[in-house]
């Protein structure tokens, strides 16, 4: 079994994962020749026993294990309690001495008060006070008694305040000395390493282990610089939370997207059975149409995980920020800068009147670097001004991505929709004619180029047809139903855009609108 006190260790490197941290500690042990156990302190109580690894310079590591102990530690050491009691006794003697002085000065004040009363009575019966010499004599006697009275009263007050201060200090010291009767429970985690040393001397130990209650998440900020050559200053951070009970001072930090606790086995494949049935007579008589909002899929889009984590696109990456950091284990977030880069971008004003009647400034850039852009919260700024917060999605190296930088205040849009319905008397076929009117205004003194995007419904059934009637000037995407047009608004200018289309349905089609 290990003998002696545990040696202290120093944290050297902390590698954060999305749900835990890996800590590397170093310690210097003085070994004797032969096989022996060494106890090292400093590890968290939450240390994962199976993850402990040990290395030794100049010695062979035979085994490593984790032990947890609970020690009873007095709240106050005996020697310190003795010093406090001695100080309390000395203060009590000082209080007694000051109380005696206070009593003596009280007596002197009483004597001065009686003398002044005698002086007043004598002055009242005095018959002859003629002459300046007699008056000066009585005045001098009065002033001497009053002065003695005031000095005595001031001294009594000073001694009273001093005694109160001493009694207050005695109470505080006595309360502190009473802590010697109480104990605290201290839980400690020790890593015991069995080593075989060929010769006696100092040996450098390196311990590696993992602990929960620690994690990291990516966070970003994008600062837009407008002008002839617009660019974005992109800064990525690693936000750390940990409440492991350890305090990591002056350590190197790594951020990894690997998942060391993930199960590596392939999932079980189950059959997905599909079945068909014939429509009933009632279902064949009519066709019910439903309106569905569908997101246009892109190659890089993936399903959101059940629990928010670090999305790395399936390939683990690691970030190594420069410098050393101090991370207190209080659970509060700490931001560490991972990278900073400048990206050239193109700017455009995007307007989606159906969603918002305000134009937004959109920047498009290609992500450059050795590692991808991880998904996470994003603060967007124009120059020195914070214009909003959004979320950055995962972007692979070399991939193009868009970021919005808030609304364009100088552009206004008003959208109006009118609708006409007709039903044929003989066939019962239905026709709905819709007209969308967009009125754009430029309130600034500069020319504003705006990319306007509108939508047409897209039919997926035979009994429903959607036919554009008036879409002149618009670029139409028939598959997804998008209509796009680039508009240049003159200073203080206005422009009106019109879209007109028909919705034709058979008599047995029940429309949702």
Image (spheres, grey):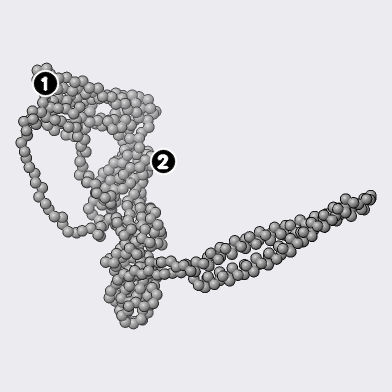
Is 158 displayed left or right of 256 in the figure? right
Quadrant where the image shows the N terminus? bottom left
Residue drawn at (62%, 63%) of the image: 166
| Distance (Cα) linking label 2 and label 1 | 59 Å
Taking the image as drawn, is residue 294 in sight? yes
Q: Find residue 227 and report its image quarter.
A: top left
Query: Is the residue marked by circle 1 packed among few (<14), some (14-19), or many (20+) residues within 10 Å?
Result: few
In the image, is 276 to the left or to the right of 30?
left
Frontmost residue, 74 versus 269: 74
Q: Residue at x 6, y 40 (%)?
A: 276
In the image, 261 versus 354, the foreground residue is 261
Q: Quadrant of residue 498?
A: top left
Which of label 2 and label 1 is nearer to you?
A: 1
Numbered label attached to residue 319: none
Residue at x 19%, y 20% (from the top left corner): 421
Q: Dot 2 corresponds to which residue?
A: 385
Name the residue beneath numbered marker 1: 428
Sequence-wise first label, 2 or 1: 2
Relative height, residue 126 to residue 180 (above, below): above
Q: Which residue is at a point 56% across and 69% down the rendered structure image? A: 84
Residue 475 place in picture, x, y as percent: 21, 30
**Left or right of residue 380: residue 432:** left
Q: Check the image and report above or below for 503 versus 166.
A: above
Q: From the image, which quarter does the C terminus lie in?
A: top left
Q: Position of residue 161 (x, y in %)?
A: 66, 59
Closer to the camera in the image, 457 or 140: 140
């Amino acid at each position: 079994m290990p003998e002696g006190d545990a040696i202290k260790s120093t944290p050297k490197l902390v590698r954060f994962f999305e749900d835990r941290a890996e800590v590397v500690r170093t310690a210097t042990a003085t070994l004797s020749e032969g096989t022996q156990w060494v106890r090292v302190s400093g590890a968290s109580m939450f240390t994962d026993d199976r993850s402990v690894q040990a290395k030794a310079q100049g010695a062979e590591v035979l085994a490593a294990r984790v032990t947890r102990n609970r020690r009873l530690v007095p709240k106050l050491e005996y020697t310190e309690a003795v010093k406090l009691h001695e100080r309390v006794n000395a203060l009590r003697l000082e209080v007694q001495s000051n109380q005696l002085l206070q009593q003596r000065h009280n007596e002197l004040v009483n004597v001065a008060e009686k003398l002044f009363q005698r002086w007043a009575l004598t002055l009242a019966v005095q018959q002859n006070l003629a002459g300046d010499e007699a008056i000066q004599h009585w005045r001098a006697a009065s002033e001497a008694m009053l002065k003695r009275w005031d000095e005595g009263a001031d001294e009594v007050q000073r001694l009273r305040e001093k005694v109160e201060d001493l009694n207050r200090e005695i109470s505080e010291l006595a309360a502190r000395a009473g802590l010697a009767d109480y104990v605290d429970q201290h839980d400690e985690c020790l890593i015991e390493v069995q080593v075989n040393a060929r010769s006696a001397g100092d040996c450098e130990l390196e311990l590696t282990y993992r602990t929960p209650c620690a994690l990291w998440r990516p966070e970003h900020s994008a600062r837009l610089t407008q002008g002839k050559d617009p660019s974005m200053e992109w800064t990525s951070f690693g936000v750390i939370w940990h409440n492991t009970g350890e305090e990591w001072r002056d350590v190197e930090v790594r951020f990894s997207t690997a998942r060391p606790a993930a199960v590596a086995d392939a999932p079980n494949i189950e059959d997905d059975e599909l079945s068909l049935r014939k429509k009933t007579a009632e279902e064949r008589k009519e066709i019910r149409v439903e309106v569905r909002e569908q997101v246009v899929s892109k190659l890089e889009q993936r399903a959101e995980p059940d629990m928010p984590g670090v999305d790395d696109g399936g390939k683990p990456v690691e970030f190594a920020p420069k410098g050393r950091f101090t991370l207190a284990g209080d659970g509060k977030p700490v931001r560490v800068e991972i990278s900073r880069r400048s990206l050239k971008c193109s700017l455009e004003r995007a307007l989606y009147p159906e969603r918002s009647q305000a134009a937004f400034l959109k920047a498009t850039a290609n992500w450059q670097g050795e590692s991808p852009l991880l998904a996470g919260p994003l603060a967007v700024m124009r120059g020195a001004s914070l214009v909003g917060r959004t979320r950055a999605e995962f972007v692979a190296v070399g991939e193009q991505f868009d970021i919005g930088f808030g609304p364009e205040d100088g552009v206004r849009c008003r959208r109006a929709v009118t609708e006409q319905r007709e039903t044929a008397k003989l066939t019962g076929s239905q026709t709905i004619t819709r007209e969308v009117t967009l009125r754009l205004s430029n309130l600034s003194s500069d020319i504003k180029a705006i990319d306007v995007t509108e939508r047409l419904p897209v039919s997926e059934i035979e009994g429903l047809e959607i036919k554009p009637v008036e879409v002149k000037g618009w670029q139409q995407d028939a598959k997804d139903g998008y209509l796009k047009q680039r508009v240049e608004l003159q200073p203080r200018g206005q422009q009106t855009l019109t879209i007109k289309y028909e919705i034709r349905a058979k008599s047995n089609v029940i429309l949702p609108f």
